[in-house]
Amino acid sequence: MLNLYTKCIRKQPVRLVQGALRNLSDETNGRRESQVQKRIREELERDKNALKWRKTNEEAGDIDTKLKLFANQEQTSDYIIMMQKPINLNPKDWLAMLEKRKEKKERHMQQFMPERHEILGPDLATAHFILHRGGAVKFLNSQNWMKADENGEFKLPSTYHAQFKVEALRCDNMTLYYEGLENIRWLQELKFLSFHNVKTFDDWCLDRVSGSQCHKLEILDISGTQCTARGLSCLYRLTNLKLLVVDDPKESLEYELTCSMLEEALPQLKIVNAGSLHEK
């Protein structure tokens, strides 16, 4: 009995040491895990702060003065650049500046007006827009083209009429900007569209036309414009297109290849030279 008691006393310190080592190991592992978790949380917090929107000058606490009333909110950078330049009395530069202002005003005037389309509907609103700028309009079930007279006047309803559906538009020789094309994107019955000699018409404009709701468009004339082979590639969206008029389908190898690929994508499409249709 005494020997058994002695053996138990001898084994007890060993068990205590083993338990202490086990507890120390658990504390070390827990400390390591807490450090890893802390580092992960810090990285997540840093990434979250990097994704936040930057504060504007006003929110950052910049001084706000009454001189802000004279600031141009839309084109402050242009105004600062102009003020930093020396006074230029060159007549050519003055004329260029006036032309730029005129273009800016015209772009603003050609912007899409939801109120006009709500009152007139998309077809009559487009007809008013095109006729006012010297273009021509042909309505569905009508044999005659409508144009404004010498005084720029024309007879069209000032409210919505369901029987007026635009079938064809001639925008030849017009000054038509990208902003104005939003007005002609909603013509469900449009089959003919011409931008002949519209010098402001480029690849961006062609892309906007190709993404319009004119699903019945069959004839498109882009001769005399700034459209390149890059712009032609977007015309695959016009699935009903049958005739495309360009300056020269073989003006370059890239242009010819793009025309061939477009005709392959649209089997019913025929691309012709503008010289065979327009008088020189």
Image (cartoon, helix red, strand yellow):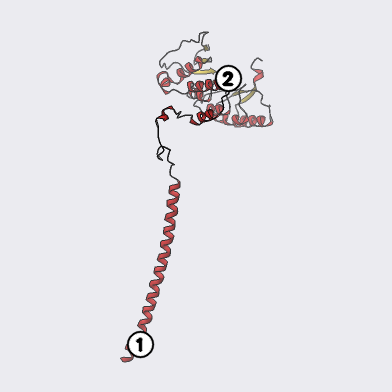
Question: Which residue lies most toward the top here?
Answer: 150
Residue type for callout 1: Lys
User: In this figure, which residue is indicated by the disc labeled 2?
Assistant: 95
Q: Residue furthest left?
A: 1
The residue closer to the viewer here, 126 or 190, is 126
- In depth, the one of 73 and 197 nearer the eye is 73
Label 1, secondary structure: give it: helix
The image quadrant of residue 278 is: top right
**In the image, 253: left or right of 122?**
right
The N terminus: image quadrant: bottom left
Residue 266 visible, this orientation: no
Q: Position of residue 23 (x, y in %)?
A: 38, 72
How far apart, in angstroms, are the residues tagged by discs 1 and 2? 112 Å
Q: How many marks?
A: 2
Please tell me which of labels 1 and 2 falls first in the chain: 1
Helix, strand or loop at mark 2: helix
Q: Which mark is residue 70?
A: none
Report if residue 119 is visible in the image.
yes
Residue at (52% x, 22% y) in the render: 101
* Residue to which mark 1 is pinned: 7
- Indicate the position of residue 136 as horizontal and vertical percent values: 53, 14
Rendered residue at 31%/91% (across/down): 2
Please state which amino acid type lies under the numbered disc 2. Answer: Leu
Q: Determine crowd level at label 1: few under 14, some 14-19, many 20+ residues with C-alpha closer than 10 A.
A: few
